[in-house]
Image: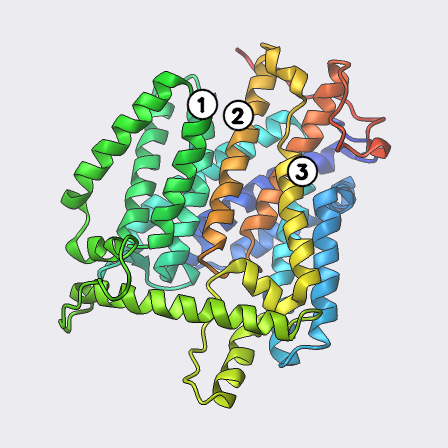
Amino acid sequence: MPAIPLQGVSSPPFQHVAATGGILFLFLVISRTPDFIGVPGVALAVGLVALTAVALSGGAMSAISSKAGLLLSAFTVWLCVCLLFSVWKGGSFHLLKETWSRTVLAFVITGGSLFTIAQLRKAMYTTAGAAAAIVMFGFLFASAESGRLAFHRGTLANPNELAAYLLLTIPFCFFVFWDSKKVIVKMAMVLVTLLLLAMTLRTGSRSGLVNIGILGFYLFFHASVPKKILMVVASLIMMIASPLYLPDSVLARFRTIVGSEQTAIKSGAEDPEDRQGDFAAGSTESRSYLLRKSIEVTLANPLFGVGPGMFAVAASDIAKEQGDRALWQQTHNTYTQVSSETGFPGLIIYLAFIVAIFRATRLPPQWAKMSDPEIQLLNNVALSLRLALISFCGGAMFGSLAYGMQLPLLAALAESLRRVIVSKSFQLNTTAPMWVPRATAPGLRWAAPRVKA
């Protein structure tokens, strides 16, 4: 029986093509495979095929009309409005054309192509596979010439952004570990997760270390007592083993978390690897300065901001007026990046977008007592997506991630989960969660193959 999970998706063949293309596109985008193999047009070609199939199947309208899709559309419209008031319209237009347009299309492709539990499950496994690919590429193309692990080119050449990116993929490895019944697959996911954590620590990113703590605390809070004990033991082992794995330069950076820049090591060395404590102290001071400036810019431009992507330009102008040295850097805080560049309205929409993703991962309370294996699968998907979103929100406090694909892709997966939850609710004749739009409830059908226990 062909899967027709949503009224208005009237072309199952196109939907199957869209799902296949969307999952392949998801792998290429998250693993960054085209960048590393030197064929950047592959993701674009696959994306265009998937987008065409998504449009023909009706999935594009389904994605856009969802709550997350409407908020993303509202944010896009507001970015265009803020463009008119940008301090450099050409720069803002370039960002919207080259970066944000691809981000929106990634949401439409992914959110409009996954409609059944089988497709959603494949997407989760594919993302975990992309995480494994990143580990492989790390061994091939990353280095620690400056004392911190990073790739040689692209956005992942920034150790802090690399750390945030790596941590974002770990929850998908958790899902495969929870879902798979094969011991070899579970062992592989444990290995990939440990390597991702090791790579994250090797970046020397203090924000990454804090983010690991946030994720660990969330898992600890929701774990059973035996798992809590296991987590404590594992944490102690990692703390004891870290000095054996991490160089002194990285440990010097981490020590600045509990000390101020005045207590940081002032080595006086010329080798960048030996001066990471010095660099960390300077980074702390720089981040504090940028945070103050971003708040200052926000309060000076509360309605429209200074234009998408234009904080560095506006901050440099302010620095010149005040006789200070211009840093020409981003805010290193996604929330003040949005507020300074799009004003308080943009920040409100952005935060509402994050809340909508959280809400889309909620399962009906009455499902907690059910033993249906499909419900357990959906619960694992929901928990993994919440962990990934928590990881993003934590990383967003220390990075400028507002216009990247990470959050919209999480929104697309969460929206796909929401559709499947609604389908399952009607199959079980249970009440759908209150946040489900009533207009979309009729016509939802459950046509996915059952998952073996």
The mark nearer the N terminus, 2 or 1, is 1
> Residue 289, relative to residue 116: is it above or below?
below
Residue at 70 percent of width and 70 percent of height:
304
Instruction: Give the number of marks.
Output: 3
> Residue 229, relative to residue 161: is it above or below?
above
Q: Looking at the image, do the residues carrying marks 2 and 1 touch, with CB atoms under 8 Å apart?
A: yes
Q: Looking at the image, do the residues carrying marks 1 and 3 touch, with CB atoms under 8 Å apart?
A: no
Q: Secondary structure at mark 2?
A: helix
Q: Where does label 2 land, which residue?
A: 380
Assess disc 2: are there few (<14), some (14-19) or many (≥20) residues with their C-alpha within 10 Å of its C-alpha: many
Q: Looking at the image, do the residues carrying marks 2 and 3 touch, with CB atoms under 8 Å apart?
A: no
Q: Where does label 3 land, which residue?
A: 415
Residue at 65 percent of width and 61 percent of height:
101
Q: Is residue 95 left or right of residue 418?
A: left
Residue at 74 percent of width and 55 percent of height:
73
Residue 145: x percent and y percent?
22, 63
Quadrant (top left, top right, bottom left, bottom right) of the N terminus: top right
The residue type indicated by label 2 comes to Asn
Q: Secondary structure at mark 1?
A: helix
Residue 177: x percent and y percent?
41, 25
Task: Give the CA distance from mark 2 to mark 1.
Answer: 7 Å
**Which scheme is used to colour this image of the protein?**
rainbow
Task: Give the CA distance from mark 1 to mark 3.
Answer: 21 Å
The mark nearer the N terminus, 1 or 3, is 1
The residue type indicated by label 3 comes to Glu
Q: Where does label 1 land, which residue?
A: 178
